Amino acid sequence: MIETNIPEFSIELLQAGDRVEFARMVEAYYGPIYRLALKMLGDSSDAEDVLQNTFLKALQYLPTFEGRSSFSTWLYRIAANEALMLLRKRRPTVPVDENPDDDEDGFMPAQFSDWCCLPEQDFLTAESKRQLDQAIQKLPETLRVVFLLRDIEGLSIRDTSEALGLSETAVKTRLLRARLQLRESLSTYYGERLTYRMNMETQE
């Protein structure tokens, strides 16, 4: 979720090179930026690299920040680009601003499980969180970054589009595709849990 307790910063002081203000900014955004990088890359060492490079580039480009977007959106854009560049070094992939198949009808999940009967605590277990993290890692990076910024970090559709340089329509389409693919990925796991619970209830 997007941080609600991040303090306001003086852009003027940051741009003037105030070290105390910059340290406050780093302390406030360390957690959200690291979390985004870790979920994008699935590797703590790579996430640390993205974190470090994000703040180094923020420091480098602060004088050019014009305030056309919020500071947090600008920082997320730097972090997302750093993570995507690292992913592309691992293997060539489609750039985030290209959309060869951004079609809402282009993906139809083969399997859906109805999870309505599962109690809420089943979705909050450590195992459930691991399953979700693994499913997120299986998403194509162009969908993964949209899902993480919108649904995990809590950015608005508008802020997500600004952070990634995409149209709002492309963000909405990729978000839908990401959610559908995650639902399919998790259908087997939650379907088995639902079957187990139903069998236990019939035996009581």
Image: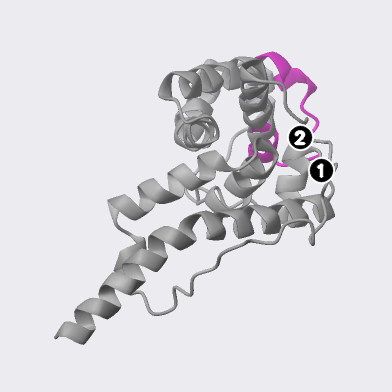
Residue count near mark 1 (Cα–Cα under 10 Å), binned few <14, some 14–19, many ≥20: some
Tell which of 89 and 81 is nearer to you.
Answer: 89
In-image side of 151 versus 11 (left or right): left
Residue 156 in view in this figure = no
The quarter of the picture where residue 82 lies is top right
In-image side of 71 versus 168 (left or right): left
Write down the residue under mark 1.
166
Tell which of 161 and 198 is nearer to you.
Answer: 198
Give SS at disc 2.
loop
The kind of residue tagged 2 is Val
Give SS at disc 1.
loop
The kind of residue tagged 1 is Leu
Q: Could you tell me which residue is drawn at 62 percent across and 51 percent down?
A: 150
Labelled pair 2, 1 in contact (Cβ < 8 Å): yes
Write down the residue under mark 2.
96
Q: Could you tell me which residue is drawn at 55 percent across and 59 percent down?
A: 184
Residue 137 pos. (x, y %) = 52, 39
N-terminal-most mark, 2 or 1: 2
Colouring: one colour
Residue count near mark 2 (Cα–Cα under 10 Å), binned few <14, some 14–19, many ≥20: some
In the rendered view of the protein, which quadrant contains the C terminus? bottom left
Region of the chain picked out in magenta, as a range: 60-75
Residue 181 pos. (x, y %) = 60, 54
Mark 2 vs mark 1, CA separation in Å: 8 Å
Classified by dominant secondary structure, the portion drawn in magenta counts as: helix
Q: In this view, does 104 lie above or below 22?
A: below
Residue 175 pos. (x, y %) = 68, 54
Please check the rendered image and state whether residue 70 is part of the magenta-colored stretch, yes or no.
yes
In-image side of 113 versus 15 (left or right): left
